[in-house]
Amino acid sequence: MKELLFGTAGIPISSEGPTAQGIADVKKLGLGAMELEFVHSVNVSEEKAPLVKEAAIKNKIVLTCHGSYYINLNSLEKEKVGASKKRILDAANRLNLCGGWSCCFHPGFYMKTTKEEAFDRVKKSIKELSKTLIKEKNDVWLRMETTGKGTQFGSLNEILRISSELDNVMPCIDFAHMHARTNGKYNSYDEFSSILQDVEKFLGKKGLQNMHIHLTGINYGEKGEKHHLTLDDSDLKYKELLKAFKDFNVKGVVISESPNIEKDSLMTKKFYEKL
């Protein structure tokens, strides 16, 4: 990507129309990206996808999507792994029809397996998904997201290790999740910089220039994430994070998942542009 774009997780709260109208409203707000929320279902029909694509092209808005919440690539039940892979492919394929760029999802849970067993199982599924998208000529990025609880597969190291081995797989880095997962760590300029250094270590400059980022305030405890907060109601030092983005010349999309998605997205965009 040529720059760092800011956008909303879903249609802006202030928008009253369908997805295509939401994209136009993102443009009116002065933002550059929008995430399609496929978390409960792929809610853009195959028939409406060309209209969404047209709106994105017309308004120069980069589209991403968040795949289903109902995914566990480490399930010990083959049927659940198969269903999880299908949900990921359904989201990626519909995003592709919408002219989108990057499909993120939570990969799963450790369950009763060891972390290395979970790693091998998740990696096997991601490799299969990667091959399928390449075969189908779908160039949407597959993005495992860093997760907010210690019970969930999705540490930065796990996701970077898998991403470094596959051409069409990259991380989705949720900085609030990393903050919550570690019960308050990853909350300073130096710690944010260490994350970006790891991205470059595993993925090179391409990793920093094609980032899919989630940003929100977050409430957390010893077991990790509880729920999202607005940035101003949280302890996340987002200004230091934005400074790190600037210093590392990060490019890609920053998607606001705050309760007030467009307000926080605009606030972070304006602060970033002043740096």
Image: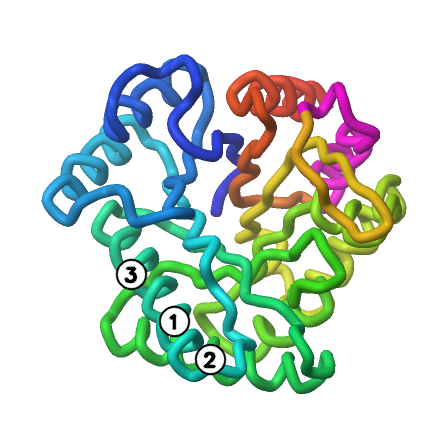
Q: Hey, what amino acid is under mark 2?
A: Ser
State the SS at label 3: helix
Q: Residues within 10 Å of mark 3 (few under 14, many from 20)?
A: some
Q: Residue at x 38, y 71 (%)?
A: 85
Q: Is residue 49 above or below residue 20?
A: below
Residue under numbered circle 3: 90
Q: Residue at x 59, y 45 (%)?
A: 213
Residue under numbered circle 2: 125
- Horizontal side, residue 137 vs residue 69: left or right: left
Q: Quadrant of residue 188?
A: top right
Q: Of the two numbered discs 1 and 2 on the same chain, state the one appearing first in sequence.
A: 1
- Horizontal side, residue 267 vs residue 167: left or right: right
Q: Nearer the viewer, residue 264 or 72?
A: 72
Q: Residue at x 47, y 76 (%)?
A: 126
Residue under numbered circle 1: 85
Q: Nearer the viewer, residue 138 or 40?
A: 40
State the SS at label 2: helix
Q: Of the two numbered discs 1 and 3 on the same chain, state the one appearing first in sequence.
A: 1
Q: Position of residue 47 (x, y in %)?
A: 10, 44
Separation of residues labelled 2 and 3 (CA atoms): 15 Å
Q: Position of residue 255 (x, y in %)?
A: 54, 36
Q: Give yes or no for residue 266 being in the magenta stretch.
A: no
Q: Residues within 10 Å of mark 2 (few under 14, many from 20)?
A: some
Q: Say if residue 206 shows up in the picture.
A: no
Q: Position of residue 5 (x, y in %)?
A: 51, 34
Whether residues under marks 2 and 3 lie with C-beta atoms below 8 angstroms apart, the answer is no
Q: Residue at x 41, y 68 (%)?
A: 84
Q: In this picture, which residue range is highlighted in magenta?
A: 230-248
